[in-house]
Amino acid sequence: MTQRRVAVIGLGLIGASLGGALRARGYLVSGLDHDPATMQTALDRGLVDVVSDDLRVVLKEADLVILAMPVLSIIDTLPQIDELSRPGAVIMDVGSVKGPVVDAMERLPGAGRMIGGHPIAGKEQSGPGVADVSLFQRRSFALVPSGATSIPTLHTAESVVRAVGGVPVVLAAVEHDRMVAMTSHLPQLLATALALSVEPRDESLAGPGLRDMTRLAASGASMWTDILVSNADNIAAALGGCVAQLQNLSTMASAGDTVALEGAMTLANERAATIAGSVPS
């Protein structure tokens, strides 16, 4: 049986973790990153078989191409990937926003072999040094076809997701981007805003609650800049809803309405428990 070959373009946390997970399942993994040190780390940790800074070399025999870069870089690179990769190769991205990516895919000659993807997994740290081949175990992995994605391409993507231990969830780009604005992008913004709001003079009384609430603020700035710009409308709607909730809580507190406050906090307790139960540990 011919060994399956995958090219991973972008060897940060997600790309390197995917490469390592697929390599553990028998894929021959070639990797490329703009940073030579990042490629070397991925190679030294056994997350890829070979690395190269030449895109043609990395794509030459790949059956599957995974684009694991910031969203705007994915969109910019797609035409070149379509041109240089083998005609039968499946092309999948793993960016956190899908609308603009699948729109770009649908306009390309090889649209039928392209599909959007987004693993609902990650860490606030970045780079192959913290990559984890078990990162996707039991995690939802969104698969977002364009209007031109072929059925065989979707089936291949589903098999890849299952190979790394993920749970494929097929949905439309508009629904994906609305959902992650609330479940992923809003928490990042709130953590960032909270970290920016804390004055240095207050840090002497900082406890584990503040540490936990600001953990996401340590996430990579360049990656998140692309995400926030690419999904701005959905994020604005999610943020508007959250601001309304904050204002409502502030109004209750100012009015001394302990009954309303306790009711809101109790409802939040219930929803937090539901959220905790839905996320694999």
Image (cartoon, rainbow, N blue to C red):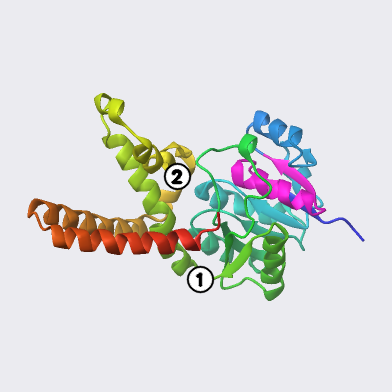
* Amino acid at pointer 2: Trp
Image quadrant where residue 47 sits: top right
Q: Which residues are magenta?
A: 8-32
> Does residue 243 appear anywhere in the picture?
yes
Image quadrant where residue 240 sits: bottom left
Q: Residue at x 82, y 56 (%)?
A: 4
Helix, strand or loop at disc 2? helix
Quarter in which the N terminus is drawn: bottom right
Q: Residue furthest bottom?
A: 151
Q: Residue 103, position in %: x, y?
A: 52, 64
Determine whether, in the image, residue 79 is placed left or right of residue 19.
Answer: left
Q: Separation of disc 1 and disc 2 at Cα?
A: 22 Å
Instruction: Please say whether residue 18 is one of the residues in the magenta stretch.
Output: yes
**Number of other residues with Cα within 10 Å of mark 1, as a class: few under 14, some 14 to 19, many 20 or more:** some
Helix, strand or loop at disc 1? loop
Q: Earlier in the sequence, mark 1 or mark 2?
A: 1
